[in-house]
Image: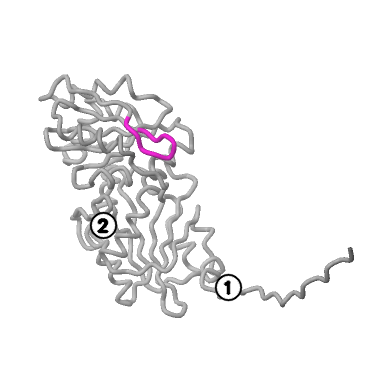
Amino acid sequence: MQSGISVSTELHSAFNSLVNDESSRFLLATITDESLVPLETIPSQSPSNFHADLALLAPHIKPNEALYILLRRSPSRFVAVTYVPQTAPVRQKMLFASTRLTLVRELGGEKFEESIFATDANELTAEGWARHEAHVAGDQPLTQEEQDLQGIKEAELQESGGTGARRVQTSGHLSMSVGEGAVEALKGLKEGGEENLVQLKIDVQTETIILVSSTAGATAASLSTSIANDEPRYTFYRHTSDGNPILFIYTCPGTSKVKERMVYAASRGFAVLLAEQEAGLPIAKRLEFSSPEDIGPDAIDEEFAPKEEKKTGFAKPKRPGRR
């Protein structure tokens, strides 16, 4: 989803100053009048202690207002944080989520080593950041429930051909981690193999696109039961109509968590570009449904039905009235 909002000249200048001035730690930004603008630059109080400097953010973090935070993790490492609290207005949530890729792309995606989506102020404290780093590094102790979930994810990845992930950057867009087997499965759709339905999901914690399944024999009638109905999905389907067009179907059930909705909505453009640029897969149609139950053969087939043009006969000019 693209918002049509762009980075202002003022924000470009403020970010360049952040990059060049090692005494600056944070640059706060927001959306005003359809433009990304700077709010304030916060200097470091502990240049050698990033976690201590996180306390400087507290006065600026509000429980009902979204905010962009561009921060210096170390002298040459930068991170883009999109803070969208759950109590923020709905329109603001969608606007900030759909613009986060634009923010990083226009400022220079190569400058950012990471892009983080936060919904709780605690995630932006020293303790919260330490938990994030531990999670990324894989050193965080897991509860039994988390271990069970991790086991399920690992099983899914093993079925898809491995557990590795790599960073992929589409032309002019922010990079994301992509799990092993995802691009290969998409290429299979292009090559016309037996599999004609590929489902991808996002590990929201690490923002990694993961291959869920690659199956054969899918039809427009079977999509409603083939696609998961308990969490969002990016689905690529090779239709059986003339030319075997490829459809991208984005589903997001109403029961999905707020953070899931934000991350999936903001990243669906990347999913399409991943298919087009990495797998060489031409996307004929992009469809969106709240629930897989809404996907029926009629909804798919009507996308390819010829449009009837209404023909209007030549209208003879009316005779001018008498004067």
- Of residues 12 and 57, the one drawn nearer to the viewer in this rendering: 12
The CA distance from mark 1 to mark 2 is 34 Å
Residue 117 lies within the magenta run: no
Q: Residue furthest front?
A: 323
SS at circle 1: loop
Q: Nearer the viewer, residue 27 or 210?
A: 27
Q: Which mark is residue 155?
A: none
The residue lying at 50 percent from left, 52 percent from top is 290
The local secondary structure at tag 2 comes to loop
Give the residue displayed 25% in from the left and 33% down from the top: 14
Residue 31 belongs to magenta span: yes
Please provide percent x and percent y for residue 273: 32, 60
107 lies above or below 244: above
Number of residue marks: 2
The residue that disc 2 covers is 170
Which residue lies at the image location 23% right of the left edge and 47% below the top edge? Answer: 109
**What stretch of residues is rendered in magenta?**
30-38
- Label 1–label 2 contact, CB within 8 A: no
Residue sitting nearer the eye, 169 or 199 = 169
- In percent of width and height, residue 57 lies at 28, 23
How dense is the environment of label 1, judged by Cα within 10 Å: few (below 14), some, or many (20 and up)?
Answer: few
- The residue sitting at 18% across, 55% down in the picture is 164
Horizontal and vertical percent position of residue 201 = 34, 54
Three-letter residue code for mark 1: Lys
| Residue 77, picture quadrant | top left
1 or 2: tag closer to the N-terminus: 2
According to the picture, the residue beneath numbered tag 1 turns out to be 307
